[in-house]
Amino acid sequence: MTQLELARKGTASPEMKQVAERENVDTDFVVEGLAKGEIIIPASINHANLVPCGIGKGLRTKVNANIGTSSDFSDLNVELKKLRTAIDCGADTVMDLSTGGDIPAIRRAMLSVSTVPVGTVPIYQAGIEAIETRGAIVNMTADEIFAVIEEHAKDGVDFMTIHCGVTQASVARLRKQRRMTDIVSRGGAFIIGWMLHNDKENPLYQYYDRLLDLALEYDFCLSLGDGLRPGCLADATDRAQVEELIIMGELVERSREAGVQTMVEGPGHLPLDQIATNVQLEKRLCRGAPFYVLGPLVTDVGAGYDHITAAIGGAVAAAAGADFLCYVTPSEHLSLPNVEDVKEGTVASRIAAHAADIVKGVKGAQEWDEQMSKARKALDWNTQARLSLDPELSEQVHSKIPASGSTCSMCGEYCAMSIVEKYLGISAGKC
């Protein structure tokens, strides 16, 4: 039985109990959230070394790190180093988006060492194999697409991005309204190209029940991909994007009826004043399904700093109710990220997630900040480093310019807290 089916029977699986313990909530809370479809636990029956992770309402906002090869650069050792870096920096999940080299071998290597849930986008492999065997992406068959999905499931992939909401009707609406950046989803582009060339409906939508059967068998989580997400602020919250979201809401209901865990992916590029509205739309149209957002990026001019533009949007989205942030690295729009980019992207996204958790009232979030405040009051630099998101960097920065006393080199003997403690007689231990 799937995690969702067990929850509906009131049965707490080992994974549910582990998630409850990690989140510091009652097991019944997790079971109830799963039964409603507001919480998911991506946990393939074939991912042997997995530490379960819960995503959804009432839980800590989670962070995903995208890694993987490209057609221009493929090195398994580098990808495994990115994987370790992402996990060490606190990523809750990783996605293998490889499009170069031996894609199945790369995926299997990642799964063999990853303790966090691993996600994939099977249409990448299906499209690339179609190019190699049939000469073009548009020549792949529906059977070949589903064969790749099952291959990923057998390997132990915990969640898969599947672009089911792109239909002939939504594409027609897109063509009629027009966009500045058209389609920026690679998986969406693969599917749309196939649909237009073959003049057929999206097989992932047309044969959705077939997809549900696979998800039931292997208990992987469906991540309904937003193939029509906006790629710039000018295209945000347009008719094509919203129509796809409406379709995904209907598919969420079909998934739940079948006993399949499902989350919904979201934009993308959004101006600040549209982020909360987008979260509310998803929660309303998709009946509270966990919302997985890419960023969102709040400006289009942050090239080289898009981990920051995404963190700003991610904090706003998560505070409004988004459950899962896909990190963005400094290389977004420019290059395949390297190991350092993965670290910076993960940390930036974790800052956004934690900032939102304070607003959400997630257990332990505010307490973490209070512990840091007390350590700062006490000028306890070791504890400050330990409580930091990046302890190593905290220690490096603190020691780069030596201080003469217990304060840091920014204020030295003119440290405000040191002065006030001296004259008020209030020490950190009395706060």
Image: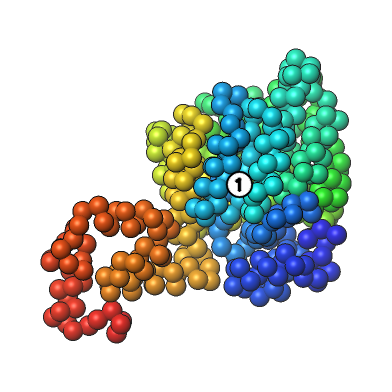
Question: Extreme top residue here?
Answer: 135
Q: What residue is at 70 percent from the left and 55 percent from the top?
A: 49
Q: Is residue 185 visible?
A: no
**Neighbour tally class for label 1: few under 14, some 14-19, many 20 plus, Cα within 10 Å:** many
Could you tell me how many numbered marks the image carries? 1
Residue at x-position 84% and y-position 69%: 9
366 vs 166, nearest the viewer: 366
Whether residue 366 is visible, yes or no, is yes
Residue at image location 51% in from the left, 31% down from the top: 336
Q: In the drawing, does residue 108 fall left or right of residue 370? A: right
**Disc 1 residue type?**
Val
Q: What x and y, as percent, mark residue 131?
A: 73, 19
Residue 388 placed where, x, y %?
40, 61
Q: Residue at x 66, y 66 (%)?
A: 19
**Residue in the foreground of this view, choosing between 374 and 156:** 156
Quadrant (top left, top right, bottom left, bottom right) of the C terminus: bottom left
Q: Nearer the viewer, residue 136 or 358?
A: 136
Q: Quadrant of residue 65?
A: top right
In the rendered image of this protein, does residue 412 appear above or below residue 147? below
Residue 107: image quadrant is top right
Please tell me whether mark 1 sits on a helix, a strand or a loop: strand
Left or right: where 91 falls relative to 377? right
What residue is pinned by disc 1? 94
Position of 127 with respect to 94 (left or right) is right
Give the percent coordinates (x, y) of residue 11.
81, 71
Residue 249 against residue 303 in the figure, above or below: below
